[in-house]
Image (tube, grey):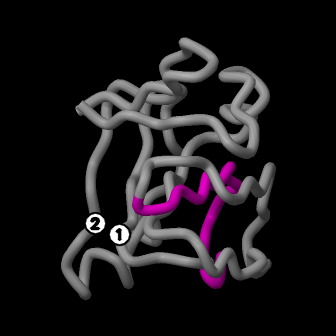
Amino acid sequence: MTIINQTQKTIIAQNVKIAQTLSSRIIGLLNRFSLDENEALVITQCQSIHMFFMKFAIDAIFVDKNNVVVGLVENIKPFQLSPIFFKANYVIEAPVQTILRTKTCLGDRIEII
C-alpha cells in the first residue's frame, strides 16, 4: 500500500501496514526498533497516541473520515503523549522528518492506495 498527500503531490510512504484489530492497534510499533524512510503504520479508530515503551521517535499525521489532515505531531519521542484530535479517524505513524519532507499541512487531502 502507498500513502499519497494529494494536495502536495508527495508520497508519504510506500510500504504501509494497517493496524485495525484491537491487538494490532495496541501493539502498533512497540515491537520495532525503527522505521525505514518509506515505511508507515496506519492505526484506525485513533484520535491520539502514546509513546510509552517505544524505542524511537516518529511523526504522526492525524486524518479524519474524509481523508483530510486534522492534526500533526512532529518528532514525538518515547514516553510522550500526543494531543487528542477529536476529528481524527486514523493516524499515520511515520519516520521523523516525514511531515517536513512531504510538506504535509493541516487541511491536506490524503489517499491510501
Tags 2 and 1 touching, CB below 8 Å: yes
Q: Secondary structure at mark 1?
A: strand
Magenta-drawn stretch contains 64: yes
Q: Secondary structure at mark 2?
A: strand
Whether residue 55 is situated above or below residue 47 in the rendered picture? above
Q: Position of residue 73 (x, y in %)?
A: 77, 57
Q: Position of residue 24 (x, y in %)?
A: 26, 75
- Name the residue carrying label 1: 44
User: Mark 2 belongs to which amino acid?
Assistant: Ala
Residue 96 relative to residue 12: left or right: right
User: Mark 1 belongs to which amino acid?
Assistant: Thr
Disc number for residue 11: none
Q: Position of residue 51 (x, y in %)?
A: 65, 76
Residue 31 relative to residue 100: left or right: left
Residue 36 relative to residue 81: left or right: left
Which quadrant does the N terminus fall into?
top left
Q: Which residues are magenta?
A: 51-65
**For discs 2 and 1, the disc positioned in front in the rendered view:** 1
- Name the residue carrying label 2: 19
Task: Count the labels in the image.
Answer: 2
Crowd band around label 2 with a 10 angstrom C-alpha radius: few (<14), some (14–19), many (20+): some
Instruction: State the residue at coordinates (61%, 49%).
Output: 69
Determine the image quadrant of residue 97: top right
Instruction: State the residue at coordinates (80%, 51%).
Output: 75
Magenta-drawn stretch contains 8: no
Which quadrant does the C terminus fall into?
top left
Crowd band around label 1 with a 10 angstrom C-alpha radius: few (<14), some (14–19), many (20+): some
Whether residue 50 is situated above or below residue 77 in the rendered picture? below
Whether residue 90 is situated above or below residue 2 in the rendered picture? below
